Amino acid sequence: MMPAIPQPAFYILKCEQSAPPGMPKPSCVKADDPESQELFMHLAQSLMMKGIVGTVSPIKTGCLNRCALGPVMLVEPGHTMYVGLTKEKIDKIIDEHIIGGNVVSEYVVPEAMWGEPIEPASIAK
Ligand code: FES
């Protein structure tokens, strides 16, 4: 039976953490960078305009721990971390990855800043 509300094909977790002006730590939403403040809205509107917001859920999150590479967002499934985002890059990610099925590798976090996850079972007490 078809569920009333099918599960999304993708969740896109966009870091919306901001730091106060003068704070030395970098953040994904910057007080002196208007584009960084508009990226979540741009993501949500682009998904709506493409007609896919019903199956691709944009989610605002706090810090994803790659602050120096921000603005960042994580695409699930796939565990794909995109960094250094702009509106243009988000549009390309929607077209090529979310709709086209191909990860946009030039915007993916460098391997040295990501690597393989640690399996919880290997460290659980
Ligand atoms: S502030 Fe966005 S990853 Fe830390």
Image (cartoon, grey):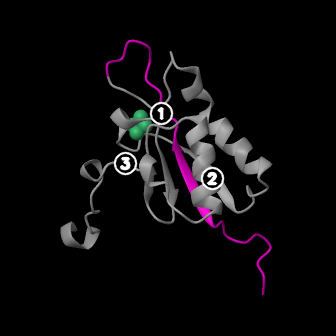
Residue 125 in view in this figure: no
| Image quadrant where residue 46 sits | top right
| Residue under numbered circle 2 | 94
Identify the amino acid type marked 1: Gln
Image quarter of the C terminus: bottom left
Pointer 2 or 1: first along the chain = 1
Q: Nearer the viewer, residue 86 or 124?
A: 86
Please tell me whether residue 10 belongs to the stretch shown in magenta: yes
Q: Residue at x 43, y 54 (%)?
A: 105
Pointer 1 or 3: first along the chain = 1
**Do residues under tags 2 and 3 come within 8 Å of each other at their CB atoms?**
no
Say left or right for 54 vs 103: right
Q: Nearer the viewer, mark 1 or mark 3?
A: 3
Instruction: Name the disc covering residue 109, or none.
Output: 3
Could you tell me how far apart the alpha carbons at marks 2 and 3 are, in whole angstroms?
A: 17 Å
Tag 2: Cα neighbours inside 10 Å, few (<14), some, or many (≥20)?
many
Kind of element beneath mark 2: helix
| Residue under numbered circle 1 | 17
Magenta stretch: dominant secondary structure? loop
Image quarter of the N terminus: bottom right
**Do residues under tags 1 and 3 come within 8 Å of each other at their CB atoms?**
no
Identify the amino acid type marked 3: Val
Q: Residue at x 44, y 57 (%)?
A: 80
Where does the image place residue 82, in percent across and percent down from the top left? Answer: 45, 48
Where does the image place residue 87, in percent across and percent down from the top left? Answer: 60, 36
Say whether mark 1 is within 8 Å of ligand 1: yes
Q: Which residues are magenta?
A: 1-24
Say whether mark 3 is within 8 Å of ligand 1: no
